[in-house]
Amino acid sequence: MIGFILTRAAQSAFVLLVMSFIIYVLLGLMPGDPIDLMIGADPNVTTADITRLKALQGLDQPLLDRYAAWLANALKGDFGYSRLFAKPVLEVLGPRLLNSLVLMAISLALALMVAIPAGIHAARRPGSWTDQAINLLCFAGVSVPPFWLALLLILLFAVSLGALPASGMQTIGDGGLLDRVRYMILPTLTLSAAGIAGYTRHTRAAMIEVLREDYIRTARAKGLAERRVVWRHALRNALLPVVTIAALDFGSLFSGALITETMFSWLGMGKTIYDAVMGNDYNLALVGLLLATGVTLVANILADIVYAWLDPRISYRVERGS
Amino acid sequence: MTFSTAHPRSGISSAWRRFRRHRLAVVSLWMLALLFAVVVPAPALEAMLGLDADAVNLFARMAPPSAAHWMGTDELGRDLLLRLLHGGRVSLLVGFTAAVAAAVIGTTLGLISGYFGGRVDAIVMRFADGVISLPLLPLLIVLAAIDPGKLGLPEEITGSESFSLYRIVVIIALVGWPTVARLVRAATLSLRQREFVLIALAQGFGSARIMFRHILPNTASPVLVATTLTVGNVILFESVLSFLGLGIQPPVPSWGNMLTGAQDLISEAPALAMWPGTLIFLTVISFNLLGDGLQAALDPRSRRVS
């Protein structure tokens, strides 16, 4: 098991390194460069000044040398400054990563809390009208554009009803728990919609499979209440694929968070990366993207570990393989 | 001497019968047919009405429906109906092109992966897993924001109005292939053990011939299902990128970028936000239901429930 974790960690570190290079190159291909942005404000700059400034920043060096220099600094813990915030990038990103993780964790929890009972309900009577209604709702959930769902929620709850705030994270001067909760409701609903739909379908499929097993027939035959059979005996095994998929899905949760955060001005990683890309803040975008990728990779390793831990057959196979 | 490489098919007519039992899929098929029917002749309608979808009229902003503008005008006084129709053309065009491109890449890699197995399979599948598990949207906005001029692409390509269209197709195809690749790989793995493939191997045919002549035709069902589902996802993805200002660039309308302007005006002109969003939603859900119906029809065993 430890060997397996180490192998996966090494693979992930390698993926992260490759990604850092790819992103570095891509960011270099974005319009303009830092010096262009700097001199935009001053019409008196001469060509000689520009050359000198570029040399000062190392921008006249070949791409590989610049990347190597960046990597050397990064490995020492120096990730550079954010142009938009005039602060070290880690100082900007730290609290924002936390904001994102809070939003993502609550949305994921809500999604699972709705999806598991819904999926079980649908699985118990396949083909019934409730099953069909749940199925249609799931299709709706994966088909609705998330930013449009956010617009509809804003239109209904903020514009028409005036019941909830349309954007931001807290009222200035308030910031109590209740106030923060009010600001969280709409972003959480938006972000959890796709998850609810996806996990309901997975729960339903897994549950139908499990309910056909011999041990379920045995449990029923010995006279257990149907409720106990479903919630105790079947659910345990049906949850395994659902939990794994939820953990493996972390990357798309990040994608959803980018849209949700942008729509609701939630100061998280997604919005920060978007703003950094749009505002030519190369350092911030680079480190933000790597942080998002790194967190996702860690979540994927955790998913593998949880899976192996929940299902002894898996860990046997993996250990023999590694 | 030739051997028949055909294998027993389940038959088009029985597939059609199964498809028709999936009522939602049938409704979706009709809905998509209707959408095509109104969207394709949009330029003709434009000429008939004597309007120009790009004509700005700042004195008739956000006008209600009238005889001249059947659905009213948008925030720049442009005809809403025509822009919706043109946006639909763009969304469907991007959806189909990108989905087909992703299907071609995915099918090729899936075939190679499933046929050769071993190390090749491991590399391709790890790569596919990697693409799927990454936080795609944050990475794609960087890809969408790069300056094509710095890639050395000539000005006449990058400067054209439809460049953003090509770019989004390429970007989506680059990340859309793993789903198809996995399905084709799974089909290839089982087909590879079938008699007709073993006979072809025994006859000494080359790998390429066996893969493309013998195995590929038999993966048509999963490829068709996956491509249909991908079209829906691509349209959804295109709308997100366009909404964020990184997809289809105005003045070319797309359902996604029409919503960018509507967001700020949501309390004054909610209709501007309702129409494009409703159309994206209906189109995407139709493709998803159609894919579901096709799967039920073409691969009856995949249906766990009767």
Image (cartoon, coloured by chain):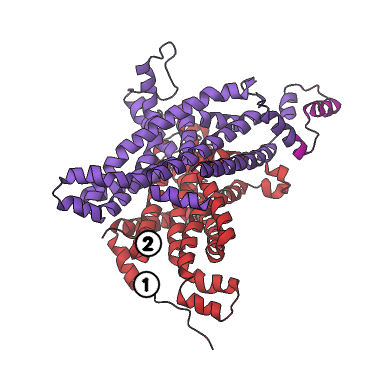
Chain colours: A purple, B red
Q: Which residue lies furthest to the top in this view?
A: A173
User: What residue sits 57% from the left and 29% below the top?
Assistant: A275
The answer to if A64 sits in the magenta stretch is yes
Residue B77 seen anywhere in this rendered image of the structure = no
- Above or below residue A37? Residue B198 is below
User: What residue sits 63% from the left and 33% below the top?
Assistant: A286
User: What residue sits 61% from the left and 21% below the top?
Assistant: A85
**Chain holding disc 1:** B
CA neighbours of label 2 inside 10 A, class few (<14), some (14 to 19), many (20+): many
Position in image of residue B220 (x %, y %): 46, 67
Reading the image, the residue beneath label 2 is B294
Secondary structure at badge 1 equals helix
* Foreground of the two, A280 or A78: A78
Kindly report the distance in space between the C-alpha atoms of the residues bearing marks 1 and 2.
Answer: 12 Å
* Foreground of the two, B46 or A129: A129
Position in image of residue A279 (x %, y %): 62, 29
Reading the image, the residue beneath label 1 is B12
Q: Earlier in the sequence, mark 1 or mark 2?
A: 1
Q: What residue type is labelled 1?
A: Ile
Give the quarter of the image for residue B72.
Answer: top left
**Chain holding disc 2:** B
Position in image of residue B52 (x %, y %): 52, 46
Give the quarter of the image for residue A117.
Answer: top left
Secondary structure at badge 2 equals helix
The answer to if A213 sits in the magenta stretch is no
The region drawn magenta spans: A41-66
Residue A88 seen anywhere in this rendered image of the structure = yes
Q: Which amino acid does label 2 sit on?
A: Leu
CA neighbours of label 1 inside 10 A, class few (<14), some (14 to 19), many (20+): few
